[in-house]
Amino acid sequence: GAGVSQTPSNKVTEKGKYVELRCDPISGHTALYWYRQSLGQGPEFLIYFQGTGAADDSGLPNDRFFAVRPEGSVSTLKIQRTERGDSAVYLCASSLNGRGGPDTQYFGPGTRLTVL
Amino acid sequence: RKEVEQDPGPFNVPEGATVAFNCTYSNSASQSFFWYRQDCRKEPKLLMSVYSSGNEDGRFTAQLNRASQYISLLIRDSKLSDSATYLCVARGRDDKIIFGKGTRLHILP
């Protein structure tokens, strides 16, 4: 079946602008994760959804970052007043059940965000 | 100290050789461990989970040493296609998932 998809694959924006990044998880997966990966670094956890609710948003760097998953499937990561330091690859992953078990995360191809 | 630390490499290894790298974790409450593989400009993909008793999958062997708080990955008879970045992952009792920075491996023909 289809894997995790993310759109757009690339996004170039100017400092101060607002961006939305979309993630379509694997159908039936209840858990969804957002990560950010900078060059030469491993993925950095941002937020985790179990169904529609954000079960853990402790990784969001500040209040410019927000994510939603209104119907428990597609999720949108929203970044307000973008800064150059926000430039990174934003990865989305989904898993069948989420935390509490040996659950494999499947990653999407990522959105490469460049803030000029 | 970083929660999950890895030697960034690169490890340059001739084809057919055996290569091993370790990953250390600082949180003794970490419960689950994984190795992910990431190709250049691609997403991470699960290579294998790491079990307390150690586990093997073909040419790959993973070990966990809780006393010393490290996990290892051994690759035997390395192939050119093994060239990638290998990410160590620890999941804590609170289910928080922490990735290491990754170890770059180059298999040389």
Image: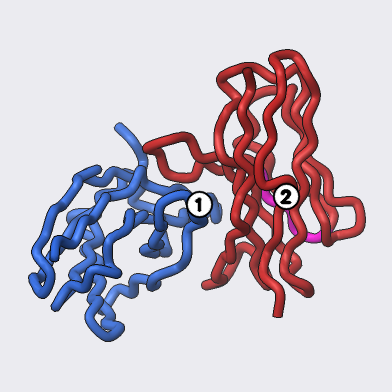
- Label 2, label 1: how many angstroms apart (C-alpha)? 13 Å
Q: Is residue A42 left or right of residue A22?
A: left
Looking at the image, residue A14 lies above or below residue A70? above
> What amino acid does circle 1 point to?
Ile
Residue range in magenta is A47-51
* Quadrant in the rendering for residue A95: bottom right
Spot occupied by residue B16 in the image (x, y as percentages of width and height): 10, 74
Looking at the image, residue B12 lies above or below residue A77? below
User: Which residue sits furthest bottom?
Assistant: B58
Q: Chain letter of disc 1? A: B
Spot occupied by residue B60 in the image (x, y as percentages of width and height): 25, 76
Looking at the image, residue A73 lies above or below residue A76? below
Colour blue, chain:
B
Seen from the viewer's position, the closer of residues B85 and B107 is B107
Residue holding disc 2 = A55
Residue at x 73% of width, y 63% of height: A25
Residue at x 71% of width, y 24% of height: A13
User: Which residue sits furthest top?
Assistant: A16
Instruction: Report the quarter where the C terminus of chain A lies.
Output: top right
In the rendering, which numbered label is found on residue B97? 1
Spot occupied by residue A93 in the image (x, y as percentages of width and height): 63, 58
Colour red, chain:
A
Q: Does the magenta portion include A53? A: no
> What amino acid does circle 2 point to?
Ala
Q: Chain letter of disc 2? A: A
Q: What main secondary structure does the magenta stretch of the protein show?
A: strand
User: Which residue sits furthest right?
Assistant: A71
